[in-house]
Amino acid sequence: MQAQIDQYTSEINAFSPANADELETFRIKFLGTKGIIKDLFEQFKTVGPEEKRTFGKVLNQFKQLAEAKYNELKEQHSAESSTQNAQDLTLPGDDFAVGSRHPLSLVRNEIIDIFKRLGFVVAEGPEIEDDWHNFSALNFPEEHPARDMQDTFFIKKNNGKDDIALRTHTSSVQVRMMEHGKPPFRAIMPGRVYRNEAISARAHCFFHQVEGLYVDENVSFSDLKQTLYHFVQELYGAGTKVRFRPSYFPFTEPSAEMDISCTICGGSGCNMCKHTGWVEILGCGMVDPNVLENCGIDSKKYTGFAFGMGMERIANLKYVIKDLRLFSENDVRFLKQFQTEML
């Protein structure tokens, strides 16, 4: 046994592992449950009583040597690994991909910021609406074409007030606000709306609107024009021209459509403005007295104006995007163009 211990002691003293795997092999060979030291202690049981004290001391010293050697090499290897893996803080950082906001989110946030500075708050409502809030309260006659299946996604249709549909405009939020509150109201209603239309570069079955409502005493069409004129100057720049054209909407009287000078060609004429120099961006008008009365508001005391615009149209003019389908296809190549807009 003494000869064996002397041989193993020389082996331990000379051992120098090249890597962690060799060190682990050393541990298993000498200190493992089936290793050499375990085997020597089994042999020690057969040593005579007169020799146990001598060989017991030698065996314990051998075990301590093996354990000390292993711990020393383990610490040395760990220190070397830490040094190798340590990061040089003077090196430049690694590049990483920067995300981007969707162009519609950028436009939505900008519109909200402009109207908030004018005292408007943001109101929201459900995308699944009943006939009253989506049509009837807004002065849509029973025979109005917007009620037809060609324009509206009906979920439940009973040819009456129980009809349930995906909202065709965010005007339904205006109705809910007027029903459950008291004037004055000054709010904008951004949100997604749905129309049963063929998908193309210029139309989609869903899109986004921002509608606005201001109801108070002595609200006039002049207030409407000045509000929208200020909005256009803030969004497109001080040189943008504005014009109003008479129009018709069931829920406003009088009604108008508002055009701005084309931001693409500066008014000289292009495909975007169909060579007219003007682009229509929203509809507006004074809230029809019937709508106010339907919502429990005294139309003889209060007046108001409303307007609505498509966010896709606003984004088209702001970023020169000619295909509406790009907004919903999640093409990373398209979205990456708006990274700088976040900074």
Image (cartoon, rainbow, N blue to C red):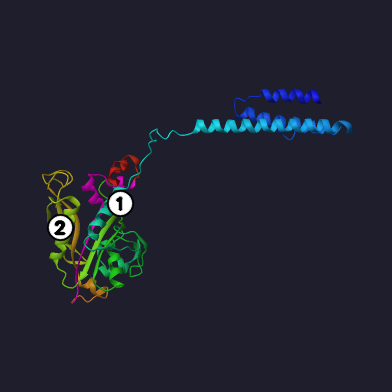
Q: Is residue 48 visible?
A: no
Q: Amino acid at mark 2?
A: Tyr
| Rendered-image quadrant of the C terminus | top left
Nearest to the observer: residue 109 or residue 70: 70
Q: Which residue is mark 2?
A: 229
Q: Is residue 296 left or right of residue 18?
A: left
- Tell me the element at label 2: helix
Q: Amino acid at mark 1?
A: Ser
Q: Position of residue 207 (x, y in %)?
A: 30, 53
Q: Is residue 223 above or below residue 60?
A: below
Residues marked 2 and 1 touching at CB (< 8 Å) = no
| Quadrant where the image shows the N terminus | top right
Q: Give the magenta range.
A: 301-328
Q: Which mark is residue 105?
A: 1
Seen from the viewer's position, the closer of residues 179 and 73 is: 73
Residue drawn where x is 71% and y is 22% of the image:
10
x%, y% of residue 239?
Answer: 12, 50
Q: Which mark is residue 311?
A: none
Front residue of 66 and 217: 66
On the picture, is 282 further left or further right than 95?
left
Q: Earlier in the sequence, mark 2 or mark 1?
A: 1
Marks 2/1: CA–CA distance: 22 Å
Q: Is residue 202 visible?
A: yes
